[in-house]
Amino acid sequence: MSETKVKILDRTFKVMIPAEQIDQAVSRVAEQLNRDYSNTETTPVVVSVLSGAFMFLADISRKLTFNHEISFLKISSYSGTKSTGKIREELGLNTDIKGRDVIIIEDIVDTGISMHYLMDYLRGFSPKSVEACTLFFKPGNYRGTEEIKYRAMEIGNEFIVGYGLDYDQLGRNLKDIYVVCEE
Ligand code: IMP
Ligand code: MG
């Protein structure tokens, strides 16, 4: 494990989930996807949400044993440690997903507003199916109605950084997951 405490801007964070544990959770969810998508008629499209999911995508796609295309979308809803509740689309889809199976790769589903928006947005292109795959799920904050079929890990309502997730754009490079500590 790396440094147990890190300072980012005005806050101190401590290790909550070490890299080895993240890797095991990613492997488990990749196996579920391998079971469900190994015999599809068309090539599935893995749509990753920038920027937070970049590290999860890099790791999970190397564990997927079926052929898949990779595409990116960028939206933003967070400012500091709070969700603004408003989604801004910063980069749209540039892959033809009509009639295809789509797997959304997200870093974290918190209130669910972003995932709801993404699923609606992608369904607008008439894909065959759209499923959500998230590294983290916060059941205590979730207000959505969409089923989040693939969840690598469930956590409480705490704010976390590392492994792609940021605090005001910083901390994405950390290989473990860190949580705010109050001293
Ligand atoms: P939602 O729309 O409330 O579900 O928020 C989802 C987005 O907020 C995620 O894609 C993240 O970018 C961001 N987010 C939510 N919780 C956290 C957190 O604990 N740390 C860092 N980013 C978070
Ligand atoms: Mg995100």
Image: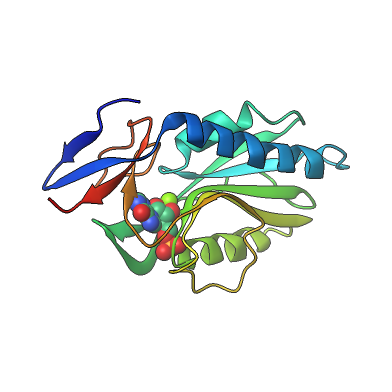
Q: Quadrant of residue 155?
A: bottom left
Q: Quadrant of the N terminus?
A: top left
In the image: residue 102, left or right of residue 116: right
Residue 89: in sight, yes or no? no
Position of residue 96 measured from the top left corner of the image (x, y, whole percent): 69, 45
Position of residue 118 measured from the top left corner of the image (x, y, whole percent): 55, 59
In the image: residue 44, left or right of residue 27: right
Asked if 65 appears above or below 107 in the picture, the reply is above
Which color mode does the image show?
rainbow
Q: Residue at x 62, y 68 (%)?
A: 146
Residue 82: in sight, yes or no? yes
Position of residue 60 measured from the top left corner of the image (x, y, whole percent): 59, 33
Choose between 46 and 91: the one closer to the eye. 46
Q: Residue at x 13, y 43 (%)?
A: 9
Choose between 32 and 74: the one closer to the eye. 32
Q: Residue at x 41, y 42 (%)?
A: 51
Q: Quadrant of residue 159?
A: bottom left
Count numbered badges in the picture: 0
Q: Residue at x 73, y 43 (%)?
A: 32
Position of residue 136 measured from the top left corner of the image (x, y, whole percent): 49, 51
In the image: residue 121, left or right of residue 103: left
In the image: residue 183, left or right of residue 124: left
